[in-house]
């Protein structure tokens, strides 16, 4: 849409459409602008990579927090003995619980 400015020159006016309020969103592969050109296999790979990274982060986070908690609360030998159950619990939370 072109209009004349006060100087007599043509200027372009861009109109934006807010899909949330005025119309229904577009359907199909191009509906998601972030992954519009990605093949389905690449999108699945990116999701799997994100999940693996998140699982790894959650494992080390829970293992570290629970391990430090055991170190501060329990005596030394009890804290060392609690490392194996903490490892198993952290593994279950990160990889088997499907929370992440």
Image (cartoon, rainbow, N blue to C red):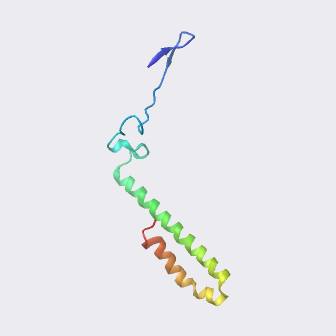
Q: Nearer the viewer, residue 88 or 17?
A: 17
Left/right placement of residue 58 relative to residue 39 reads right
Q: Which residue is farthest top?
A: 8
Left/right placement of residue 88 relative to residue 26 reads right
Q: Position of residue 39 (x, y in %)?
A: 35, 49
Q: Which residue is farthest bottom?
A: 77
Please name the residue shown 53% across and 79% down the image: 87
Q: Nearer the viewer, residue 60 or 19?
A: 19
Where, by quadrant of the figure, is residue 80 drawn? bottom right
Where, by quadrant of the figure, is residue 21 drawn? top left
The N terminus lies in quadrant = top left
Q: Position of residue 5 (x, y in %)?
A: 54, 13
Q: Which residue is farthest left?
A: 28
Question: Relative to residue 94, is residue 5 depicted above or below?
Answer: above
Please name the residue shown 40% across and 34% down the image: 22
Q: Nearer the viewer, residue 67 or 25?
A: 25
Q: Position of residue 34 (x, y in %)?
A: 44, 45
Left/right placement of residue 23 relative to residue 57 reads left
Please name the residue shown 63% across and 78% down the image: 69
Q: Position of residue 23 (x, y in %)?
A: 37, 35
């Amino acid at each position: 849409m072109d209009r004349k400015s006060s100087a007599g020159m043509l200027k372009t006016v861009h109109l934006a459409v807010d899909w949330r309020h005025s119309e229904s969103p577009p359907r199909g592969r191009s509906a998601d602008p972030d992954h519009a050109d990605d093949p389905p296999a690449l999108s699945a790979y990116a999701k799997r990579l994100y999940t693996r990274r998140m699982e790894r982060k959650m494992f080390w986070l829970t293992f570290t927090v629970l391990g430090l908690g055991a170190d501060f609360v329990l005596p030394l030998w009890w804290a060392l003995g609690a490392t194996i159950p903490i490892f198993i619990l952290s593994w279950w939370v990160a990889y088997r619980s499907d929370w992440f």
